[in-house]
Image: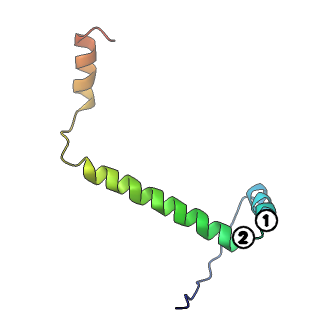
Amino acid sequence: METKQKRATIYFDPDLHRALRLKAAETDHSVSQLVNEAVKLSMAEDMEDLAAFEERTAEPNLPFEKVLKDLKRRGKI
């Protein structure tokens, strides 16, 4: 099954663009391949973060003020 690719215009910092072009040449990949892989990795990390948040939704909320009061009461601050 062939995947149609979409075109987008992305503006890079000049130094970052140079480094990206050099990495592409060294790894025998295109800049597009490197950017696609980086975006996929970033989105995978986002999915992991969302899963972690979901797992913790049942945990009780702990207000910051209460934490501070508890630390003071125990002589930690």
The three-letter code of the residue at mark 2 reads Val
Residue located 65% across and 75% down the image: 9
Secondary structure category for the residue under label 2: helix
For the image, the number of numbered tags is 2
Q: CA distance from mark 2 to mark 1?
A: 6 Å
Residue located 59% across and 85% down the image: 5
Q: Position of residue 8 (x, y in %)?
A: 62, 78
Q: Is residue 55 left or right of residue 48?
A: left
Disc 2 vs disc 1: Cβ atoms closer than 8 Å?
yes
Q: In this rendered view, identify the residue nearer to me: 29 or 53.
A: 29
Provide the residue designation for mark 2: 31
Q: Is residue 24 visible?
A: yes
Q: Position of residue 23 (x, y in %)?
A: 77, 61
Instruction: Sort mark 2 into few (<14), some (14-19) or many (20+) by Cα contacts within 10 Å.
Output: some
Q: In this rendered view, identify the residue nearer to me: 11 or 1.
A: 1
Q: Position of residue 66 (x, y in %)?
A: 21, 25
Q: In this rendered view, identify the residue nearer to me: 46 or 8.
A: 46
Q: Position of residue 20 (x, y in %)?
A: 75, 62
Quick one: label 2 or label 1, which is nearer the N terminus?
A: 1
Q: Quadrant of the C terminus?
A: top left
Give the image quarter of residue 62. Answer: top left
Give the image quarter of residue 19. Answer: bottom right
Provide the residue designation for mark 1: 21
The three-letter code of the residue at mark 1 reads Arg
Residue located 27% across and 13% down the image: 72
**Extreme residue in the top direction:** 75
**Extreme residue in the bottom direction:** 1
Secondary structure category for the residue under label 1: helix
Task: Describe the colour scheme in one phrase.
Answer: rainbow
Question: Eyeballing the image, is 36 above or below 19?
Answer: below
